[in-house]
Image (tube, grey):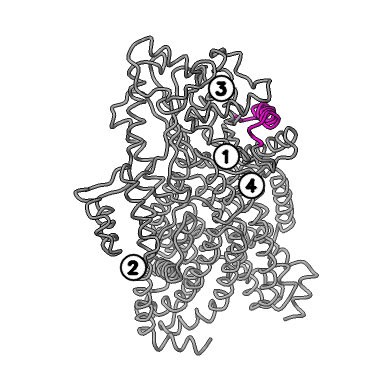
Amino acid sequence: MHTYIDFIGRYYKQVLFAILFLTMLAGWQASGLKTNATPYFLDKDHPSRVADRELKKVFKGSGEVLVVGTETKSETIFNPRSLDELYRFTRAAESLTLTDKEDVARLKDIIETAGLDGMFKDTFEGIETFVPADYTRIKAVDKAISGSDKVSAEQKTFLKHLLFRVWPVKKVRGIVRIESITAKGTDNFDIHAMMPKPPRSEDEIKALEAEALGNEQLKDILFNPRNKRVINTLIELRIPQDDAPDMKRIYDLVSEIPHQIGAKDAYHISGPPAIFAQTAAVVKSNSDKMFPFVILVIATVLYLLFKDKRTMLFPILVAVVSIVWTLGTMAFFGYEQNIVSTLIPVFLISIGVSDSVHFYAEYNRLADGDRLSRVRHVLKKVLKPMLFTSLTTMVGFLALSYTPIGFIQSFGIFVAVGIVYAFVITVTMIPALQLLINIKSSNGNGRTKPLLIRLGDKLEASLLNAITKHKRWVFLVMLLVTAFALEGILRLKIDNEMIGYFSKESRVYVDTKFIDRHFGGASTVEFTLSCEKAQCFRHKPFIKGLDRAVEKIKGIENVGAVYALPDFIKMMNKGLHGGDPARYSLPDKAEAYPQYLFLYENGNGREIRNVVSKDYGKTRLVIFSKSDRTSDMDRIVTKATEYISEALPNIKIKPSGFGEVLIATRDAVIYGQISSLLISFVLIFLFLIVLFRSILYACVGIVPLVMTVMINFGLMGWLGFYLDVGSAIVAAIAIGIGVDNAIYYISYFRKVGAGANANIAALKHVFGALYANALVLGSGFLVLLLSDHQSLANLGWLVSATVIVSTAVTLAVLPILFEKIPFKKRIENEA
């Protein structure tokens, strides 16, 4: 330590130059940091994601779907203007593209690089921008260069990406394009688009209305017989579910269509792509917006604490440099920023100033001496505790790497890396800057002390009075608080709700609730059912069994509609019996089932491939839910599985889709964090044993930490907050940040000895630094409360509460614990 302090005192200018050079190097590296904006927490190889991909390979119509609900102010949506708008809306959606002029130029460069100019000489001549009709020609280029070694992997990836960007909308299922099944004679089907062109006469409109509202198969999916003023459209996308930026772009483009066509009716856009795209956009924009706010708040608190501009700026400079180093490290090792790691700067700007606060809190105790001697004195006092607290905070975040979620793993790892950087920068740059630019001590009498310091002095006096004169009452209050926390924990529920994270005034929330209110719901749970018997889902026993299960599933709470194979057979049966609504049922004769399906295929019907595979060995069940809350989704999956198993006992059942991914995400994140929490406690406890060379000290030091976690979760339970994805992460973070206070207290307690006044002396020594640190950290994270996304707001107040509660519990509980005779004797013996 002495060698290090002498080195800083002698070479502080060189140290500052080295830090500047490394920061510039890291900044250059960080400029190439890429962003992975997917909102999916689960890795692609997670079973639920694999099941979802398998479902998409087997069934048509299983891509990501934007749900567009339309509402007219007229008496019915079946009026000439509204129907014409819906027709133009559909055509506009089908013609959307995400490409631009740069894509055309880049494709031509790839063709030239691959030496395929002759093959595609005139194919793209004169084209300024692509349209969906260019998909086939671009696919031909992709096929031609697939085995070429002249084209780079990056260019091939671009081409694959270009294919779905040039034609992002795969299918629009609405009144314009949806199949309608009617009879054509007595032994054939007429399968046609329901509204190939807008009807003009009143008779045509009435016929269309009767055909649409009489389609039981699409009841509460596209049409609402109870409310003729609304109608639904499903836009299936080619865009991969992980591609949040393009999801956001297509969402924005679809949102613009009503304005472009001069629509008078209201269009409400929801569905998983809308929710995920908006989630990624809000979290990213909020984290960008919060960063300057956090700096402003922390700078203000630092100024109010120290009344010196340089003491305010230097700690923030430490945090900013540590952020640059961390982002540069991420880029160097090939990591990308994701929906979670975008919060790293906000965390580091708050945590990174912590050590600087302790440095200046100690520095301000010194009124005399030259710069070098004061810096030497401060480093001797705080270097060791700062090292240990940085290590324990790092351990808390590293515990997040034990979660199965890759995004949270990288977040924990790189916040831990940033904490190490912040420590290194603090103990090098701050002393060097102090030696280069002297900052005078802000000591003075009570009248000249800053307001926050005077407030701290009053709190310190009150705490000392309570501990020395009313320790029994303090102990009793802590017991009551613990009991209160335990009761709150018992009330805590594990749940997650994607749409609930948005403001009730936000468009995506309003639109989603519109869909949930008027139709089957904006969220889905899907099942793939498969059997060993060939073509089983062509035959009566299996379709009848599936129908029995479907009817039971419709009775599950929050289930708004079910889209399944039996409804196709019912529509065919109804069509062949003159459209009689009473014949919307499954036929009695077993031979009718394969016959109906044969006639359907001969009639060029295609929509049935949404729910049954070509070999009829697998069928898909789509359950529309009016809630995306994971507890509701879980109940639907559990009940539906039970009903299907009862009706079709020998069928293999595999849940998949949006709902299953949400359930799996909840389980992986929350239950993974329980493991991280336990690991954190164990690692911190072992670290305290090594640090203080005493099991007793470790036991005492862990007590305020346990109480802090209990109180936070207890408050969540009493306030009705769910233990969700955001709040679950806080547990491990709370441990890493919360144990720092105990380390500072115990370290100074050991230094002053275990005499009768040791507690008072230690408390007086650490109170100012812990108080200032709590103000800085607590206020920094509270800025997240301004977020438009509730998960960030939850994270902000939980971490802030952790910091404040941890400080209060440490300062109130540790002195009382050390006053107890068994602890006192052991400590005196050690001394």
Residue at image mark 1:
613
- Magenta-highlighted stretch: main secondary structure? helix
- The amino acid at mark 4 is Leu
| Residue 505 rendering spot, x and y as whole percentages | 44, 34
Q: Determine the CA span between mark 1 and mark 3.
A: 18 Å
- The amino acid at mark 1 is Ser
What is the span of residues highlighted in magenta in the rendered image?
536-559
| Residue 445 rendering spot, x and y as whole percentages | 46, 67
Tell whether 34 sits left or right of 815. Answer: left
| Residue 815 rendering spot, x and y as whole percentages | 68, 65
Residue at image mark 4:
715
Residue 545 falls within the magenta-colored stretch: yes
Q: Determine the CA span between mark 4 and mark 3.
A: 57 Å
Return the disc, 4 or 1, that comes first in the chain's sequence. Answer: 1
- The amino acid at mark 2 is Lys
Which structural element holds mark 3? helix
Quadrant occupied by the C terminus: bottom right
Residue 180 falls within the magenta-colored stretch: no
Residue at image mark 3:
572
Residue most extreme to the left = 126
| Residue 516 rendering spot, x and y as whole percentages | 52, 29
User: Residue 627: which disc?
Assistant: none
- The amino acid at mark 3 is Met
Return the disc, 2 or 4, that comes first in the chain's sequence. Answer: 2
* Circles 2 and 1 in contact, beta carbons < 8 Å: no
x 25%, y 50%: residue: 123
Tell whether 66 sits left or right of 806. Answer: left
Q: Is residue 442 visible?
A: no
Return the disc, 2 or 1, that comes first in the chain's sequence. Answer: 2
Q: Nearer the viewer, mark 4 or mark 1?
A: 1
Residue at image mark 2:
150
